[in-house]
Image (cartoon, rainbow, N blue to C red):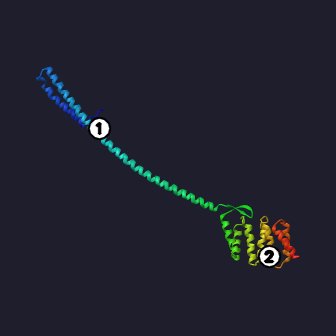
Amino acid sequence: MITFSKSRLAAAGLVFAALLPLQASAALFGDDEARRAILELRNKVDNLSRELNARLETKSDKTSALEGLNRHEQTLQEIARLRGQVEVLANELANIQKNQKDLYADIDARIKKLEPRQVTIDGQEAAVAPTEQQDYDAALALLQGGDYKGASAALSEFVRRHPESAYAANAQYALGTAYYALRDYKKSIAAQQVVATTYQDSAKAPDAMLNIASNYIELKDAKNAKKSLQSLVSKYPESPAAQTAKSRLAALK
């Protein structure tokens, strides 16, 4: 269906109004003159109509162009707004990623602190947890500092908490040494016997047996002292402790 704007209807009205006088005056002229006059007038009307339509179309085009510019400006503003939101989100994402990276680094550092580390104990490689190392070093520091009572308590706690530790035999041996320093010879013997039986493959086992004999000597128990020395020589004949035991056996005869 064809629709006409008000401006185009107005132009058509002007043309119709211009044709009415022509029909009325056609009777006053001859046919040829009337036709010429009508054609000239029609040409003028057509020209006027085209000019008017051109003006109307130009105005319409300008209006459409202006509306398009307005829409374009609005689109640019929306793009700018969205770009700003994207920048904000990108910044937030970067902060989140940085925080996660820092968190992972902190967790990794903490895990590494808890991971066992390789140490050499009496010539043997062993894995020791950081907590074991710290507890053992602290107890040994008390013993070396002359705090034998504190050392005996710390060493007893260590072997209780870490019975499977690679330091367990050494801690048990040091416990016997602490009791010997406190002149508690019976406890010293008991502590060293644990080393000689539970940790008999340890490098400290021969020395523990030698210390057992020393405790018996302090208790004036020569019989058990000789027995301990003889057992040491028999079980660990190539050890330095066995050589010392032979010398003591000769002195006890």
Task: Please tell me the numbered disc located at residue 215.
Answer: 2
Kind of element beneath mark 2: helix
Is residue 253 found left or right of 124 in the rendered image?
right
Residue at the image point whose x is 65% and y is 64% from the top:
130
Instruction: Establish if 179 lies above or below 199.
Output: below
The picture places residue 244, in percent across and down from the top left corner, at 83, 71
Mark 2 or mark 1: name the one nearer the start of the chain: 1
Residue type, numbered disc 1: Asp
- 2 or 1: mark nearer the eye: 2
Q: Residues within 10 Å of mark 1 (few under 14, many from 20)?
A: few
Q: Quadrant of residue 147?
A: bottom right
Judge by depth and name the residue closer to the eye, 25 or 32.
32
Q: Residue furthest left?
A: 28
Give the residue at mark 1. Answer: 61
Q: Is residue 123 left or right of residue 5?
A: right
The quadrant of the rendering that contains the C terminus is: bottom right
Q: Which residue is depicted at the point 15% across and 27% down?
A: 22
Kind of residue at disc 2: Asn
**Residue 31 at x, y = what percent?**
14, 20
Residue 6 location (% of width, % of height): 24, 37
